[in-house]
């Protein structure tokens, strides 16, 4: 396959959410202090839930594996602190409602803050001394999952599959959502570590082409990465592709369309085209896992919102409660109306602020009443005026209003007929809807109903 | 720390459009046409627009009370129906007829279907069609603009009979076609048709005012360009064909575009989102249909104009167009469905 590369590539559809500002854009990634207690979820990824390897009262060490399964699609979890297992109990889970977590009380006296390992890499890093198998095993041991938000186990993506040989590796530097800045900071500050991870992923997966797709509202990141690659003695032909700034440019299917100009078949997955997509944060984690043998216990979380005193990007121990993050960021004012794990477009609003950070929590976004109620006609819906804006913005070229109304009227067969399953739940339709209809909400509901029918 | 936090489905932010802002934009875009109407037809314009708007809103309010539904006047759609109806009737239409037209437009054209978003036909056009078939004489008598005839008749009913009237350019054109006369006299009226100094419906006469409003709507992204473009292009092509065949009898296509409500129809009525197709392909089919049917009526049919019937006709086939233009997902049809 020959892919034509044009400048500022993109996909059709999508939106430009102007109101969402990147408040933490210029905040360096700072280590987060060790919390008194962490709750490590046993399900932080797509796939089987881990079984705990420790029991109540056990002592655990930093990086110790505390949960795993034999299932193919799954990822182990590790303790981010030294401490004692206080309990294994249900905790508010951002996706699953309530789920089992290992609650660890930190041994505060004996707990060094985890240091960033970006300085251990330089631009001439070579993946040659590691075999593909070694890399895959290290990734598996470290429990790495897609850090962009979906949480698909990275090992499954990288491992060679004789039926679907991999050819192209695309690194997602688009930032999945407006407001989030963690990936941007990683590209700027952890450039060498990230590129080392890219090289390792290339080696492990056997891909021959590597593209790093970056939105053009991050010129500094594009420049830094291109310069680093130029300086390097072995840049392995990694190409940087500037993309148009648009949501959902960071969506896997949209990214592939933008970079390679091909559509992933409806109902299909990227490996069918020989494509692997990894997030920049995942690449950085791979480098750490392979070279430092360090498991995935911390991740970069953006704290942002107009009511937050100090928007920031922290390197947070996984399992830290959201309210501790908010307090450390200077607390929030009374005007806050919604706390969202993730970005404002696809993030999940939480009711319980003790919900712990998981491997897939890229950001905590706090929204004000004004922001969530903006442009709303007395904050209420009107009937669909059939303006067709949702069709225009849908990156998957669906008919969102038709699907939403089919679900609303309990006609799931019609919804299926209009390809409800092809929806990527990006939320562009709800965002643009002048009638304030929760189009994406109806579609998600319909998908759940359909899954239950089976 | 935080007491009341909201939990709801993503996304948590929304864009700049609301039903009210969309409708408000249309009202703003209609201002130039209303001003032109006021300039050419003086008190007739003011009274007709006010009557139609007030009676439309009153009807909508009453319908909601009867149906025990929340008040929906806040979405401004009744105001638009009122304005468009007023702009598409002759200036000397009696007030009572305007009231009847507005009541029909809202009550039968919109509310019986379930209100905004559920109506099949454009309410204003439904009201106008009702008036056209009920009071044919009144709906085809056009006063000359005040700029030509400073002694405009009074508004009172007894004077309307004596009003100085003038055939519209399209009525002259129809006569030319029927009698095989030369159409030159109509072509000479083009300049007046662009500014609005011709006989015709209240808001249809000034092409320039309508264009300004239409361009505003497109720039603000309130309407997409597809429907107006399709209507105007198809009408132009069809008009050109007739004109090229026999330029003596048929008027120039430019005159067709500038007169008889083609512009108000293309920019403000055919683009009514509720009654137009959803997809871009559907919009093109719809727009071309409106343009071609209009020209068919004008050139071959009995009526001199035709915008109203063509829009109503295409409204009726909109659900079919939508079904025909089913979108295919970006990744193609699923292979094993």
Image (tube, rainbow, N blue to C red):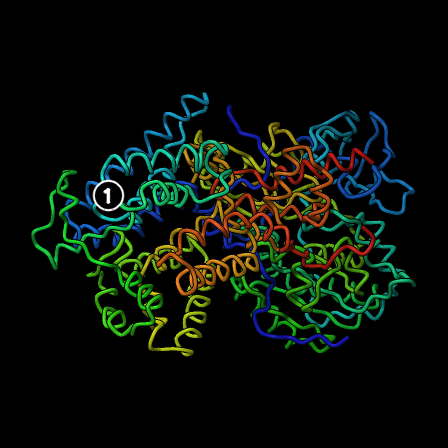
> Residue, x 47% and y 63% (percent of image)?
B292
Image coords of residue A374 (percent x, y): 43, 39
Q: Residue at x 43, y 47 (%)?
A: B16
Seen in the image, is A431 located left or right of residue B35?
Answer: right
Q: Is residue B5 left or right of residue B173?
A: right
Between B6 and B67, the one lying in front of the other is B67
Please tell me how crowded label 1 is: few (under 14), some (14-19), or many (20+) other residues with Cα within 10 Å.
Answer: many
Relative to the observer, which residue lies in front, A41 or A422?
A422
Secondary structure category for the residue under label 1? loop
Residue A234 x %, y %: 73, 76
- The reply to whether residue A277 is visible in this rendering is yes
State which chain disc 1 sits on. B
- For this orientation, the residue located farthest to the front is B179
In the image, residue A12 sits, relative to residue B78, either above or below, namely: below
Q: Is B183 left or right of A420, judged from the image as shown?
A: left
Residue drawn at x 63%, y 37% as measured from the top left: A442
Rendering coords of residue B3 (x, y %): 51, 23
Extreme residue toward the left, this view: B151
Q: Nearer the viewer, residue B327 or B296?
A: B296
Per the image, the residue denoted by label 1 is: B93
B227 relative position to A393: left or right: left
Against B116, residue A191 (above or below) is: below
Q: Does any portion of residue B21 appear in the rendered image? A: no
């Amino acid at each position: 396959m020959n892919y034509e590369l044009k400048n500022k590539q993109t996909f059709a559809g999508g939106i430009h959410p102007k109101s969402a500002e990147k408040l933490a854009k210029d905040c360096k990634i700072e280590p987060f202090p060790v919390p008194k207690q962490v709750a490590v979820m046993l399900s932080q990824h797509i796939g089987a839930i881990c079984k705990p390897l420790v029991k109540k009262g056990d002592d655990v060490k930093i990086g110790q594996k505390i949960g795993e399964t034999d299932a193919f699609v799954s990822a182990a979890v590790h303790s981010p602190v030294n401490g004692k297992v206080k309990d294994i109990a249900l905790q508010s889970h951002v996706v699953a409602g309530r789920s089992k977590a290992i609650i660890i009380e930190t041994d505060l006296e004996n707990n060094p803050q985890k240091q960033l390992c970006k300085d251990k890499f330089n631009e001439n890093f070579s993946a040659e001394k590691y075999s593909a198998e070694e890399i895959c095993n290290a990734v598996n041991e470290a429990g790495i999952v897609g850090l962009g938000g979906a949480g698909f186990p990275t090992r499954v993506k990288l491992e060679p599959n004789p039926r679907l040989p991999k050819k192209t590796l695309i690194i997602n530097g688009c930032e999945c959502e407006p407001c989030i800045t963690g990936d941007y900071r990683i590209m700027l500050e952890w450039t060498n570590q990230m590129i080392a991870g890219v090289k390792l992923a290339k080696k492990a997966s056997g891909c021959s082409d590597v593209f790093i797709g970056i939105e053009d509202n991050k010129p500094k990141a594009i420049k830094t990465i291109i310069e680093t690659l130029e300086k390097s003695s072995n840049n392995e032909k990694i190409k940087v592709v500037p993309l148009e700034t648009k949501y959902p440019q960071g969506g896997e299917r949209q990214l592939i369309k933008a970079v390679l100009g091909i559509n992933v078949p409806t109902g299909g997955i990227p490996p069918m085209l020989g494509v692997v997509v990894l997030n920049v944060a995942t690449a950085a984690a791979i480098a750490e896992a392979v070279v430092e043998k360090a498991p995935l216990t911390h991740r970069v979380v953006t704290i942002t919102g107009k009511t937050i005193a100090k928007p920031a990007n922290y390197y947070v121990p996984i399992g830290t409660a959201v309210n501790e993050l908010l307090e450390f960021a200077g607390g929030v004012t009374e005007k806050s109306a919604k706390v969202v794990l993730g970005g404002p477009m696809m993030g999940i609003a939480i009711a319980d602020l003790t919900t712990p950070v998981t491997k897939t929590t890229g950001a905590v976004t706090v929204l004000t009443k004004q922001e969530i109620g903006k442009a709303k006609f007395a904050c209420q819906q009107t009937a669909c005026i059939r303006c067709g804006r949702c069709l225009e913005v849908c990156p998957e070229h669906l008919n969102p209003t038709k699907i939403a109304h089919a679900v609303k009227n309990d006609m799931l067969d019609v919804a299926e007929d209009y390809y409800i399953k092809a929806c990527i739940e990006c939320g562009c339709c709800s965002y643009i809807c002048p009638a304030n209809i929760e189009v994406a909400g109806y579609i998600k509901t319909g998908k759940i109903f359909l899954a239950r029918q089976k | 720390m935080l007491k009341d936090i909201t939990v709801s489905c993503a996304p948590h932010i929304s864009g700049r459009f609301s039903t009210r802002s969309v409708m408000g934009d249309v009202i703003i875009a209609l201002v130039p046409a209303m001003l032109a109407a006021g300039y050419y037809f003086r008190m007739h314009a003011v009274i007709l627009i006010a009557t139609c708007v007030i009676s439309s809103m009153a009807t909508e309010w009453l319908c909601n009370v009867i149906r025990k539904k929340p008040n929906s006047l806040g979405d401004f759609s009744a105001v638009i129906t009122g304005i468009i109806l007023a702009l598409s009737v002759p200036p000397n239409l009696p007030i009572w007829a305007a009231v009847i037209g507005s009541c029909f437009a809202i009550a039968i054209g919109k509310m019986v279907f379930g209100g905004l978003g559920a109506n099949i036909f454009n309410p204003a056009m439904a009201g106008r069609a009702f008036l056209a078939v009920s009071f044919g004489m009144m709906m085809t008598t056009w006063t000359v603009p005040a700029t030509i005839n400073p002694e405009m008749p009074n508004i009172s009913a007894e004077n309307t009979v004596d009003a100085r009237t003038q055939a519209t350019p399209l009525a002259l054109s129809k006569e030319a076609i029927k009698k095989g006369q030369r159409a030159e006299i109509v072509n000479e009226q083009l300049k007046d048709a662009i500014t609005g100094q011709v006989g015709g419906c209240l808001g249809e006469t000034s092409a320039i005012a309508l264009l300004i409003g239409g361009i505003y709507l497109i720039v603000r992204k309130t309407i997409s360009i597809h429907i107006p473009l399709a209507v105007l292009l198809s009408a132009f092509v069809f008009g050109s064909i007739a004109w090229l065949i026999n330029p003596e009898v048929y008027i120039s296509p430019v005159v067709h575009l500038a007169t008889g409500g083609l512009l108000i129809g293309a920019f403000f009525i055919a683009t009514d989102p509720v009654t137009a197709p959803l997809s871009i392909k559907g919009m093109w089919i719809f727009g071309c249909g409106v343009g071609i049917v209009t020209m068919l009526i004008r050139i071959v049919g009995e009526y001199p104009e035709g915008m109203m019937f063509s829009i109503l006709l295409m409204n009726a086939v909109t659900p079919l167009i939508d079904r025909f233009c089913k979108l295919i997902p970006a990744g193609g049809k699923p292979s094993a469905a």
